[in-house]
Image: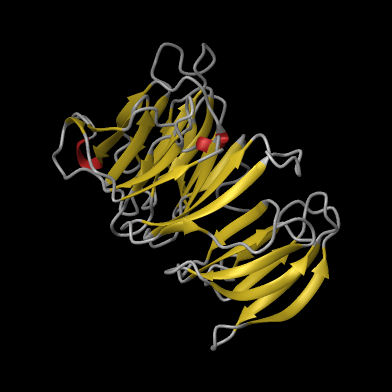
């Protein structure tokens, strides 16, 4: 038996380094030290439904139901210092959408946090959460995502409105000590037509982002599910272009290699194609072939690739090995019928 015994929890979450384990209960959130197998913190948060550790494990962010069974009259989005148990930030968050979680995002070193609100993106110095935020003015902003990496950037999306095309802009965070409303020139900007929603996929080093755009209606009437597009943007503004996909149809999935040197895209009507692109120039490098695929997973070290077809596809799985010359060799194949997803183990 494990020293912690049986834990009654609605959900659980490890910090990135595995040092902390958070368990969500009906009346509280408990944080365990996995090294000593002891309760580190017990936070009285009834009705909590989601939690998120900052990259370094310094903070935990928790969302509670905004009703009597949750936060009640209190602010229902809170951030706590794990070491001290102190609540360092709180605000009201009306609704919860798992696709937008976490609402408050942290830089890789936990020094900067940001949150998108109406017409602004707020930036916080995490050493001084109680001081006024720097409020970057971004009218009509619908989504913002902070990049990983040593020098973070934030990508924002403003949807199309009244014939004016939507836009994606990339900004550097405001200088330390900035307070109040500010306006900054974006380091990169691109207009988007016929796009209702976007998903930002940052490279692990934070130097480039893939923007997966989607629209509810396909003007060509070829797809009941609307249409998708994939754009590549460098944070420094040097390159912004459509990813050159040589087959018509939807973008099923796009994933960055953990090394940031490459990314792979699965795209097109079935049988879908899978192509590996250069992460610095967005140029195609290697074709993994076509087949009934809609899912791709890199192993944690960027050497192996799993290419698979889940959901309403047969469940075919192919494994590729990256060789010294940059080419990929098929090293195994199997089928996992009725599977819906797959993940690599931490040791790859």
Report whether residue 343 is seen: no
Closer to us: 168 or 53: 168
> On the image, which quarter does residue 103 sit in?
top left
Given residues 64 and 321, the one toward you in this image is 321
Image coordinates of residue 271 in percent, x first then y, are: 79, 62
In the rendered image, residue 154, in percent from the top left (x then y), is placed at: 35, 46
Q: Quadrant of residue 88?
A: top left
Q: Examine the rendered structure and indicate whether residue 236 appears above or below residue 99.
A: below
Q: Position of residue 70 (x, y in %)?
A: 51, 18
Q: Is residue 217 left or right of residue 339?
A: left
Q: Is residue 34 left or right of residue 108?
A: right
Residue 285: x and y in percent read 56, 76
Side (left or right) of 149 relative to 172: right
Residue farthest left in this picture: 177
Q: Quadrant of the C terminus?
A: bottom right
Question: Is 95 rendered above or below residue 332?
Answer: above
Total marks drawn?
0
Q: How is the image coloured?
A: secondary structure
| Left or right: where 116 falls relative to 213 | left
Seen at 56% across and 38% down, the residue is 194
């Amino acid at each position: 038996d494990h020293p912690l015994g049986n834990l009654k929890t609605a959900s659980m979450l490890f910090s990135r380094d595995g040092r902390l384990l958070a368990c969500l209960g009906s009346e509280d959130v408990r944080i365990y030290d996995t090294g000593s197998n002891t309760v580190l913190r017990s936070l009285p948060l009834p009705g909590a439904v989601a939690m998120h550790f900052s990259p370094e494990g310094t903070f935990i962010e928790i969302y509670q139901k905004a009703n009597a069974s949750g936060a009640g009259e209190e602010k229902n989005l809170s951030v706590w210092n794990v070491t001290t148990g102190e609540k360092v930030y709180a605000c009201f968050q009306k609704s919860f959408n798992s696709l937008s979680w976490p609402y408050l995002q942290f830089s890789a070193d936990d020094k900067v946090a940001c949150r998108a609100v109406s017409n602004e993106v707020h930036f916080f110095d995490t050493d001084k959460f109680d001081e006024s935020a720097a409020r970057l003015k971004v009218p009509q902003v619908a989504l913002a995502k902070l990049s990983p990496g040593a020098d973070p950037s934030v990508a924002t999306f403003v949807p199309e409105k009244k014939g004016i095309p939507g836009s994606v802009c990339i900004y550097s965070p405001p200088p330390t000590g900035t307070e109040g409303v500010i306006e900054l020139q974006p380091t990169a900007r691109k207009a988007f037509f016929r796009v209702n929603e976007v998903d930002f996929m940052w490279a692990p080093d934070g130097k480039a982002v893939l923007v997966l755009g989607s629209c509810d209606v396909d003007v060509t009437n070829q797809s009941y599910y609307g249409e998708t597009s994939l754009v590549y943007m460098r944070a420094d503004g040097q390159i912004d272009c459509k990813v050159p996909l040589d087959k018509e149809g939807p973008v099923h999935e796009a994933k960055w290699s953990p090394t940031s040197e490459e990314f792979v895209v699965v795209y097109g009507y079935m049988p879908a194609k899978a192509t590996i692109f250069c992460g610095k120039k967005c140029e195609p490098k290697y074709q993994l072939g076509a087949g009934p695929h809609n899912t791709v997973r890199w192993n944690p070290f960027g050497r192996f690739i799993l290419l698979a077809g889940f959901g309403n596809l047969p469940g075919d799985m192919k494994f590729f090995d990256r060789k010294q010359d940059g080419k990929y060799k098929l090293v195994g194949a199997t089928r996992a019928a009725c599977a819906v997803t797959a993940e690599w183990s931490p040791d790859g």
